Image: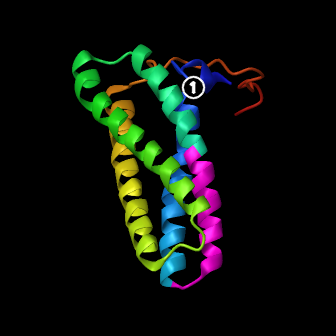
């Protein structure tokens, strides 16, 4: 896997699933509430729990990556720190919301409103943290290396082309 060779750590391999699951969980919970479909809450719960578990793994790999990733000190002291705190907050919220949704059944109306608002807050913090992460990767090449030519095996020759 030539793409993997250029990674400094495994963090980029695990972050995308929790982001997708948690944002989609918030959307499913909101749509289920608006459409008055209680069964959608179960789908949202599964997505939330799986996203929270993935977020814990992403935070764990991210904390390790933050110490070793090759980036400029000004990026480390500014963008990385905001990314770190956003993602720690989003992960903590996802775990707490998972416990709340799993343990409080049925959820009372006011509790459900508070839960939905916190889901939206979590998704917003997660989106902002992901934006900081993308900014580091695509703006400052954090976590990658300079592009190197990849040697392909069994590359077709130019013979026979005309």
Magenta stretch encompasses residue 76 = no
Residue at horizontal 73 percent and vertical 24 percent from the top: 155
Left or right? Give the position of 65 relative to 135.
Answer: right
Please give the residue where the numbered disc 1 appears in the rendered image.
Answer: 10
Q: Circle 1 sits in a helix, a strand or a loop, which is it? A: loop
Examine the residues drawn in magenta and state their main secondary structure.
Answer: helix
Residue 119 vs residue 139, the one in the foreground: 119
Magenta stretch encompasses residue 48 = yes
Q: In the rendered image, is residue 17 in sight?
A: no
Q: Quadrant of the N terminus?
A: top right
Residue at horizontal 48 percent and vertical 82 percent from the top: 34
Can you tell which quarter of the image residue 124 is in? Answer: bottom left
- The range drawn in magenta is 35-52
Q: In the rendered image, is residue 59 in sight?
A: yes
Left or right? Give the position of 122 relative to 51.
Answer: left
Percent x, y of residue 32: 54, 77
Q: Quadrant of the C terminus?
A: top right
Residue at horizontal 25 percent and vertical 16 percent from the top: 73
């Amino acid at each position: 896997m030539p793409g993997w060779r250029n990674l400094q750590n495994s963090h980029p391999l695990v972050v995308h699933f929790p982001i997708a699951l948690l944002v989609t969980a918030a959307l499913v919970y909101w749509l289920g509430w608006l459409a008055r479909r209680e069964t959608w809450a179960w789908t949202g719960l599964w997505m939330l729990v799986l996203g929270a578990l993935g977020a814990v793994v992403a935070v764990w790999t991210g904390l390790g990556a933050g110490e070793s990733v090759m980036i400029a000190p000004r990026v480390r002291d500014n963008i990385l720190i905001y990314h770190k705190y956003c993602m720690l907050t989003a992960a903590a919220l996802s775990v707490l919301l998972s416990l709340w949704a799993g343990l409080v059944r049925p959820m009372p109306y006011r509790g459900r409103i508070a839960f939905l608002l916190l889901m939206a807050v979590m998704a917003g913090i997660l989106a902002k943290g992901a934006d900081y992460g993308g900014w580091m990767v695509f703006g400052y090449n954090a976590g990658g290396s300079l592009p190197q030519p990849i040697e392909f095996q069994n590359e077709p020759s130019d013979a026979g082309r005309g």
